[in-house]
Amino acid sequence: MADDSFRAPKGTHDVLPPDSARWIEVVSTFARRAERAGFGLLVTPVFEHLEVFERVGASTDVVRKEMYELTDKGGRRLALRPEGTAPVVRAFVQHRPTTPWKVWYLAPNFRYERPQKGRYRQHAQLGVEVIGTADPGVDVEVIALAAGFYRDLGLDTSLVINSMGDPETLEHFRATLRAYLLGHADSLGDDFRARVAENPLRVLDAKVPEWQDVIERSPQMTESLSDEAAAHFERVQHGLDVLGIDYTIDPHLVRGFDYYTGTTFEFQSSALEAAQNALGGGGRYDRMAEEMGGPPTPGIGFGIGIERVLHALGERQDGSDRLDVFVVDTLGGDEGLRLLQQFREEGLRADRAPTGRSMKAQWKAADRARATYGVLLAPDEFAREAVAVKAMAGDEGQAELPLTEVVGWIKERVEALR
Ligand code: AMP
């Protein structure tokens, strides 16, 4: 145990450079998309009062079985956030901003799950929520934002959509589904029966192969929608068609939370294994604000798992961890520091090796950093108020440039390459 104490806890992981450069790329791609669509960043605490999650997810595994609960020294019952929507709605109810309230977030979630590739005890989600409008056009905008984000990253995804209807019809559907499933319980065994008793909707996303026939032939949610819910769902489909966003309707799509009403959706990737192929998903939760003591206020949003996105992207190198320029300094005085700072002030990615290394070791470090240019500060050149510049990838050797011109010269070339 002593050894394990100084390793990241089971189901968690560190993200080190250079891999973390891809994190920045994913997050900034998302932030740009979200800000362009009128969303502002919302930052909420990593822990909330236990009730925030219990109120909205009492019958879901994520809340019942997987939540990290704690009691602080003041005796407060708290939970590390297992998901992103409840904290946003809690913040909405607390601050009552004008609606529609459009926020995006980047936050870690904690779930005591069985760790495997793409499934962790701490994972990070990017997401958006729009609170205060039931307009089906907003469902379309929200889905389009996620689709655009995946497209920006060059990820192939397929979109599946469904409607959970309104709570009354969902209750009716749940009863119909339960009766149907119980009709098959004799042949499918005790696990099946227990799952049906707990929540028949949860059977629909079970991955047990022997259950699939029965699941496939089960009643479909989309057939028992109220007129209003059906019209809403129609308008969502129409909007997606208008924007040219491909989708399939999966009347058996259920997501891991019970708070959904109306539109639900999921983006899947064929680059991931089936059990973890969901890259992100979300839906409407028109009752949540009310359940937290706020006024009845509809809402919709989604969450996207960053680690899954990175898995789906694979080992692609985007060059964002490269340096523009590496300063090789054999003078060992203030000049290296000053020049380095000038490069950085001009917006170039610049670095150097710690002082005291041999010239050979410094050039090696420049290679390792995959710098585009190396700049040598050495006594002979410096006496002429010049530096030697070398394009690291080419074999043209070094060129001499006046010290006063080198920053502008490299900047111009690096910008042309970008
Ligand atoms: P959910 O909050 O369960 O609707 O999940 C939203 C997205 O978060 C999923 O589509 C995954 O991309 C990601 N995700 C959920 N749970 C995990 C986990 N345990 N580890 C890594 N990513 C996860």
Image (cartoon, rainbow, N blue to C red):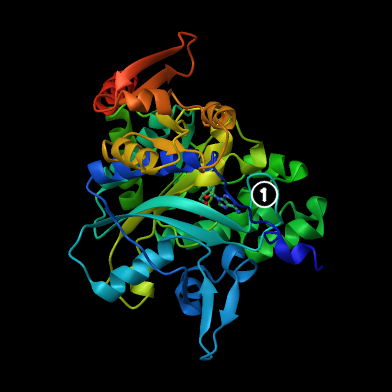
219 and 70: which one is in front?
A: 70
Residue 143 relative to residue 266: left or right: left
257 and 47: which one is in front?
A: 47
- Could you say where residue 29 lies in the image, as x and y percent from the top left? 37, 38
Residue 28 relative to residue 204: left or right: left
Residue found farthest to the left: 98
Residue 320 relative to residue 365: left or right: left
Quarter-of-image position of residue 316: top right
- Could you say where residue 190 lies in the image, as x and y percent from the top left? 80, 60
Residue found farthest to the bottom: 74
- Could you say where residue 118 lies in the image, as x and y percent from the top left? 63, 45
Q: Is residue 220 visible?
A: no
Vertical relation: 255 (above or below) 29: below
Q: Residue at x 70, y 53 (%)?
A: 115
74 and 60: which one is in front?
A: 74
Q: Residue at x 54, y 38 (%)?
A: 18
Vertical relation: 187 (above or below) 19: below
Label 1 crowd bin: few (<14), some (14–19), many (20+), radius 10 Å: some
Quarter-of-image position of residue 2: bottom right
Q: Quadrant of the N terminus?
A: bottom right
- Could you say where residue 332 lies in the image, as x and y percent from the top left? 45, 40
Q: Amino acid at mark 1?
A: Ala
Q: Residue at x 67, y 49 (%)?
A: 206
